[in-house]
Image: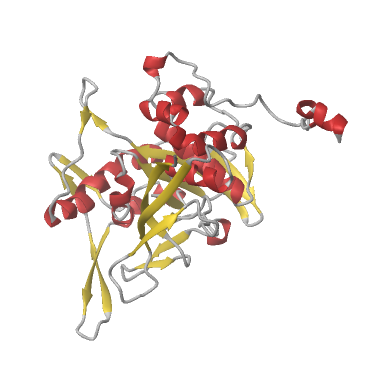
Amino acid sequence: MTKVYSEFGKERTQGDEKGKPVDFFTPVVSAEKLNEDFATVVNSEGYSPAAELMKPMMRWYEDADGNFIEQFQTTGFDTRLWELYLFAMLVEAGFALDKDFPMPDFCARNVFGPICIEATTVNPSRTRTGELIPPPPQETVEQIAEFQKNYMPIRYAGPLTAKLGKIYWDRNHVKGRPLAFAIQDFHAPNSMVTSRTALPTYLYGMEWGWEKYSEGKLVITSKKIEYHTWGVKVVQSGFFFLPGSENVSAVIANASATISKFNRMGVLAGFGSDRVKLIRQGTAANPDSNSEKPVAFVHDVNALDYRETWIEGMDVYHNPNALYPLDPEILPGAAHHRLLADGQLCSSVPNWQPFGSQTIILIQE
């Protein structure tokens, strides 16, 4: 044991690794070009659990594109973080990854079968001169309804239809396999908490409402949507009914998959400063089928009984027209949603399914 420990760096090498270890955090660009969020993660004690978790966990992440580190540190921090999350989730779910091909982002297989995943994000809008365009206000009931029915579906449509145009299913290593698009909303701070419900509206071209009868029974109503309109923009609704979309088996999302999740998972694994204390608060699925409201929660992440997995909070929206349907067993622990013939959305939801949350960082003196 003494001999092995003295040469641990040499002894731990298996000899079958492909490529070189990936170092995410040593800057490869000048300080003024670093992404503000990246710099915060690197330099803030509050995010030390996330940073320290990423260093060993992602050490052998294979950079098929060749520009992962630069983008992670600069303009593509959110996009690359989303890819890192998907990588961690797939490893946790027992997948073996094949990174011989740069596109789509992941080709993997576990005991239930293969899957190919292409990641994409909703990014902030900018003017032609590069200035950020703020999202619309959500201060009234009417503004929130328009945000969910029109603004966000249009924002989701852009990256999803762009990926549809790449025709990944024609590639030999994708043919005959379930293909999923994984999308995360980063268009504004904490935006994924409020935009989650707009995604199925766009995917299925349906709007759902509810009524509660005097005896307390909750009834969900559905209505078909043809188009989404915001200003001069008009987008056809129903991504899963667009030409070519039958080649996409599902669309994956997880409103909880942000840098805060890496921070929480880092605390759970014992990484980072011992002074960091995290409080997670948000909403989750209500087990009461007759309730129209989610359950509010507040959790102490540092508590001994706190538990969380990478796949927790994931939503998988299955394509009713898929040529190669995705087996739900391939992504256990996620919520799986299917559109029924009557327009209702049938959801298989885990016992604990957070919809969205915020994580408060405290530094204990």
Q: Nearer the viewer, residue 307 or 82?
A: 307
Q: Nearer the viewer, residue 365 or 257?
A: 365
Position of residue 313 in the picture relative to residue 197 (left or right): right
The residue under the point 49% across, 42% down is 262
Position of residue 76 in the picture relative to residue 193 (left or right): right
> Residue furthest toward the front?
365
Work out whether 191 lies above or below 72: below
x and y percentages locating residue 160 in the rendered image: 36, 42
Quarter of the figure that contains the C terminus: top left
Work out whether 29 lies above or below 172: above
Position of residue 335 in the picture relative to residue 127 (left or right): right
x and y percentages locating residue 361 in the rendered image: 40, 43
Work out whether 347 lies above or below 124: below
Residue 258 visible in rendering = no
Work out whether 226 lies above or below 91: below
The residue under the point 24% across, 22% down is 130
x and y percentages locating residue 69 in the rendered image: 51, 24
Q: Nearer the viewer, residue 148 or 137?
A: 137
The residue under the point 31% across, 67% down is 343
Look at the image and name its color scheme.
secondary structure
x and y percentages locating residue 54 in the rendered image: 55, 35
The residue under the point 63% across, 48% down is 95
The image quarter containing residue 184 is: top left
Residue 287 visible in rendering = yes
> Residue furthest toward the top?
30
